Image: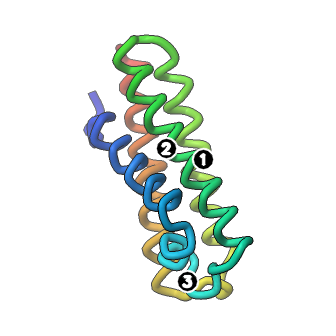
Amino acid sequence: MVPAVPNPIFQAGRIAIGAAFVADPERAGERWVGPGTAGADGGVMGRAFGVRDLALGTATVAAQARGSGYRTLLALGVACDAVDLAATLMAGDRIPSRARQVTAAVAAIATLNGVLLLANTLRD
């Protein structure tokens, strides 16, 4: 086994982030990309992102429990986290430095942990 944050704990983090974006997309969005995310566009995108993470986290935990589809959902999570990382880095100076660094770190850690969890399923 490759050391990784256990899936239920990892997905709880994804679900919590998703819930924060659904509940208050403008505030959560400001933490991700900085000020200026308020308004209709920021709210729509924030909620869409939030629902994605809520659904993905919940489905991944359920798939692991039932023993079906777990690997596929882990791979989808890795893809989503990697795109979040790339998009954050590509935004460059359009996102305040501190927000970019924190978000990039969270996305990178999530991507790596997802890869490690996926690697563990291939060893089983």
Kind of residue at disc 3: Gly
Mark 3 residue crowding within 10 angstroms, few (<14) / some (14–19) / many (20+): some
Q: Which residue is mark 3?
A: 34
Q: Nearer the viewer, residue 116 or 58?
A: 58
Determine the secondary structure under disc 1.
helix
Residue at horizontal 38 percent and vertical 28 percent from the top: 61
Q: Position of residue 39 (x, y in %)?
A: 68, 78
Residue 122: image quadrant is top left
Q: CA distance from mark 1 to mark 2?
A: 13 Å
Q: Position of residue 38 (x, y in %)?
A: 63, 80
Q: Is residue 65 left or right of residue 78?
A: left
42 versus 48 height, above or below: below
Q: Which residue is mark 1?
A: 80
Q: Is residue 120 left or right of residue 19?
A: left
Residue at horizontal 55 percent and vertical 72 percent from the top: 29
Whichever of labels 1 and 2 marks the residue nearer the N terminus, that label is: 2
78 versus 83 height, above or below: above
Of labels 3 and 1, the one closer to you: 3
Whichever of labels 3 and 1 marks the residue nearer the N terminus, that label is: 3
Mark 2 residue crowding within 10 angstroms, few (<14) / some (14–19) / many (20+): many
Q: Which residue is mark 2?
A: 54
Kind of residue at disc 2: Leu
